[in-house]
């Protein structure tokens, strides 16, 4: 099982809205870039709007970022699209056998490790901004 693709699609949407800011960025246009259905894009855009990252108006084509690129971290996107609940990135199997020495101890042993791993990953996401992502894309395409 992996982190929901909503996370990478959310990053994709925000980067493309910025890069395409001189034109109208519709859900159809975004969907063609992501190679998915516009309904999927609209659902994720709704999450991004609710988190205050984009502005969209019903019945009016287009969207725009509500913050500067440097003010939006990947952690903001991660939280906006409900990738996982707090301290719940890793699932631990339910009901191991309490009569087994591993079964009765494994959950309490690995839970703090999993929590620490999630916290470490989230610290990395906090340190990377959408500006970092867009600059890297623009460098790869020789645009600025």
Image: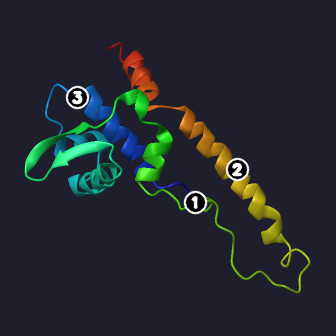
Label 3: how many Cα within 10 Å (few below 14, some 14–19, many 20+):
few
Residue under the image location 26 percent in, 34 percent down: 17
Q: Looking at the image, which residue sits at the far right?
A: 101
Label at residue 117: 2
SS for tag 2?
helix
- The image position of residue 144, as x and y in percent, is 32, 14
Residue bearing the label numbered 1: 86
Can you tell which quarter of the image residue 134 is in?
top left
- The image position of residue 13, as x and y in percent, is 31, 41
First in sequence: mark 2 vs mark 1? 1
Label at residue 20: 3
Residue under the image location 7 percent in, 52 percent down: 59
Asked if residue 5 shows in the view, the reply is no
Label at residue 78: none
Label 2: how many Cα within 10 Å (few below 14, some 14–19, many 20+):
some
Left or right of 66, for residue 85: right
**Distance between the alpha carbons at the discs numbered 2 and 1:** 12 Å
Please state which of the two labelled residues, at mark 2 or mark 1, is closer to the viewer: 1
Label 1: how many Cα within 10 Å (few below 14, some 14–19, many 20+):
few
Q: How many marks can you see?
A: 3
**Distance between the alpha carbons at the discs numbered 3 and 2:** 35 Å
SS for tag 1?
loop
First in sequence: mark 1 vs mark 3? 3
Residue sitting nearer the eye, 77 or 31? 77
2 and 1 marks in contact (CB < 8 Å) = no
Left or right of 115, for residue 48: left
């Amino acid at each position: 099982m992996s982190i929901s693709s909503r996370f990478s699609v959310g990053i994709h949407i925000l980067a493309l809205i910025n890069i395409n800011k001189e034109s109208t960025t519709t859900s159809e246009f975004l969907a063609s870039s992501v190679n998915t259905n516009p309904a999927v894009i609209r659902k994720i855009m709704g999450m991004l709007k609710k988190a205050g990252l984009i502005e969209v108006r019903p019945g009016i084509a287009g969207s725009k970022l509500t913050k500067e690129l440097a003010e939006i971290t990947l952690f903001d996107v991660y939280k906006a699209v409900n990738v996982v609940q707090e301290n719940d990135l890793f699932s631990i199997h339910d009901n191991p056998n309490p009569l087994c020495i591993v079964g009765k101890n494994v959950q309490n042993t690995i839970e703090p490790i999993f929590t620490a791993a999630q916290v470490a990953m989230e610290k990395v996401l906090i340190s990377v901004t959408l500006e970092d992502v867009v600059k890297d894309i623009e460098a790869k395409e020789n645009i600025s």
